[in-house]
Image (spheres, rainbow, N blue to C red):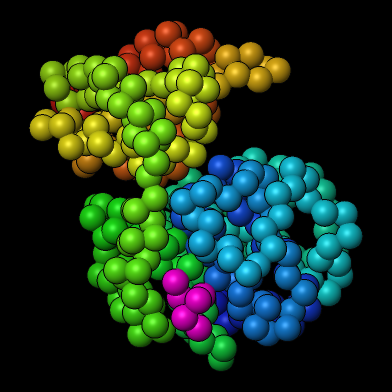
Amino acid sequence: MGKNNTTLEEILKLIADSQSWLILSHENPDGDTLGCAVALTRLGMRLSKRVMLICPDPCPEKYSFLIDGIEFNIMKQLPEDFPGEDGVIICLDASVADRTYPELLNRKFFCPVINIDHHADNELFGDINWIDPTASATGEIVTLLMESSPWGIKTDEAEALYVAVISDNGGFSFASTTLESHQCAMTLLKAGVSPNKITEQLNSNLSADILNLWARALKRITVFSEGQCAVFWLAIDDFAETGTTREATENLVNLLLRIKGVRMAALCSETADMEGSRVRVSLRACSPFDVRKVAKVFGGGGHNLASGCIIHAPLSDALIFLQEEMNRLVSGISADR
């Protein structure tokens, strides 16, 4: 199943016996972490548990329908007085503690930390780790967890899990999609999910401002490495002038893989804070390229076909550094053939 130090039955017993659940989503939340967190939050509420869902960043507008009727807490640090000795902390879809709450590494808790994830490079920071790199989304793992429980999956929980799954496997179109992914979908459809309803909620919400932002990036496409790689970029001013935020770039990088011949793609988004200039990089690829290798050069990580990192440099320099590493990866693959 993966790099685990527990069983499904042990996790189910632990959460059943715990009266308080602290559920963690990772920073800059995507559909997978949010869908899993919302599903477990709704389950906890159904079981009359004391439940708190927290995240370092706001819920993107695209996923706002998920959190209807539940309390979504934006917190930069873990709460001091929750969940307590009778509780459990459940971290979802984070390969490293830094992606959610770094205090998980250096603070002693009176309750166990459960780490549920599908990233192959997960650092096993939980007291209990359930990691399955063969899953196309953490949503698949949480679906199995809930399906195996005596409580089952209600429709609103299934909808959240369906969002989790299709957000990370591209609606069953990415190479990470497996037979188990479709079996997971079958389970969720049996629980009452309407794919058409979810797809409409997710895809029919682009604003003119977002499309104007995307247009700026699309005008800056650079194709290189004999047509196998492509990058584009967005500067800080692009977000300000279009009235958008970085969440508006979700899935934008995937458009580059639609260029004939392109097998590896990157979107660079400039940010700035007290630490100086930084560039957030979203990387996507098709087999045989493993973009984790590029991301790790800059301290990032993720999956072999979808990774991310932050380059601490001005945008112009970051683009040069990034293209050098992408070229190096292509050259290595070509040399191995």
For the N terminus, give its image quadrant. bottom left
Looking at the image, residue 307 lies above or below residue 230: below
Based on the picture, tell me whether residue 155 belongs to the magenta stretch: yes
Q: Is residue 151 left or right of residue 21?
A: left
Q: Is residue 141 left or right of residue 170?
A: right
Q: Of 67 and 308, which appears nearest the observer?
A: 67
Residue beneath the point at 50% across and 76% down: 156
Residue beneath the point at 48% across and 68% down: 160
Magenta stretch secondary structure, dominant:
helix
Residue 190 appears in the rendering:
yes
Q: Which residues are magenta?
A: 154-159
Q: Residue 265 location in percent, x, y? A: 28, 30
Based on the picture, tell me whether residue 250 belongs to the magenta stretch: no
Q: Which residue is farthest right?
A: 81
Residue 227: quarter of image: top left
Q: Which residue is farthest bottom?
A: 150
Q: Of 293 and 191, which appears nearest the observer?
A: 191
Residue 1 appears in the rendering:
no
Residue 217: quarter of image: top left
Q: Residue 179 location in percent, x, y? A: 25, 70
Q: Residue 216 location in percent, x, y? A: 33, 22
Residue beneath the point at 33% across and 14% down: 324
Q: Of 313 and 67, which appears nearest the observer?
A: 67
For the C terminus, give its image quadrant. top left
Residue beneath the point at 62% across and 46% down: 58
Q: Is residue 316 left or right of residue 8?
A: left
